[in-house]
């Protein structure tokens, strides 16, 4: 989780990602930042995030993103 929080902090240093629960709805993550985030996550965690996985509910919070990464890692 610490590695994910570091990646998120690099995208938006002013946001406390441990407290935000609607990153997409609040406009904290937009389509461009999600594309960059997906690339960074794939590199950092060695997972492949497909277009099917790029849903608002998978990117609404740091916990949701981490759950996605965990799910992808265990399904390999």
Image (cartoon, helix red, strand yellow):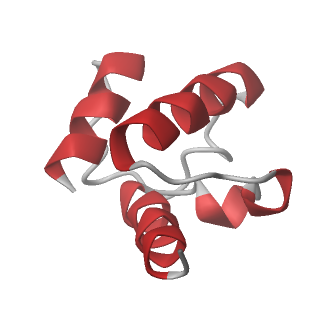
Q: Residue at x 59, y 23 (%)?
A: 36
How far across and how far down the image is residue 75, in percent?
Answer: 55, 81
Residue 22 drawn above or below residue 12: below
Residue 19 drawn above or below residue 75: above
Query: Is residue 12 visible in the rendered structure shown here?
Result: no
> Is residue 14 left or right of 39 when viewed as pictured?
left
44 or 33: nearer the viewer: 44
- In this view, which residue lies farthest toward the right? 52
4 or 39: nearer the viewer: 39
How far across and how far down the image is residue 43, in percent?
Answer: 44, 34
> Is residue 38 left or right of 30 when viewed as pictured?
left
- Count of marks placed on residues: 0
42 or 34: nearer the viewer: 42
How far across and how far down the image is residue 71, in percent?
Answer: 50, 77
Q: Residue at x 59, y 54 (%)?
A: 59
Q: Residue at x 21, y 43 (%)?
A: 3
> Is residue 32 left or right of 65 when viewed as pictured?
right
**Quadrant of the image occupied by residue 15:** top left
**Quadrant of the image occupied by residue 34:** top right
Residue 73 drawn above or below residue 50: below
Q: Residue at x 46, y 30 (%)?
A: 40
> Is residue 57 left or right of 55 when viewed as pictured?
left
**Quadrant of the image occupied by residue 31:** top right
Work out which quarter of the rendered image holds the N terminus and state it: bottom left
- In this view, which residue lies farthest toward the front? 76
40 or 59: nearer the viewer: 40
Query: Is residue 34 visible in the rendered structure shown here?
Result: yes
């Amino acid at each position: 989780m610490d590695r994910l929080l570091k990646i998120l902090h690099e995208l938006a240093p002013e946001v406390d990602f441990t407290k935000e629960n609607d990153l997409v709805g609040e406009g904290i993550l937009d389509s461009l930042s999600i594309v960059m985030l997906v690339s960074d996550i794939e590199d950092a965690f060695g997972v492949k995030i497909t277009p099917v996985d790029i849903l608002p509910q998978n990117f609404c919070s740091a916990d949701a993103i981490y759950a996605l990464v965990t799910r992808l890692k265990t399904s390999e």
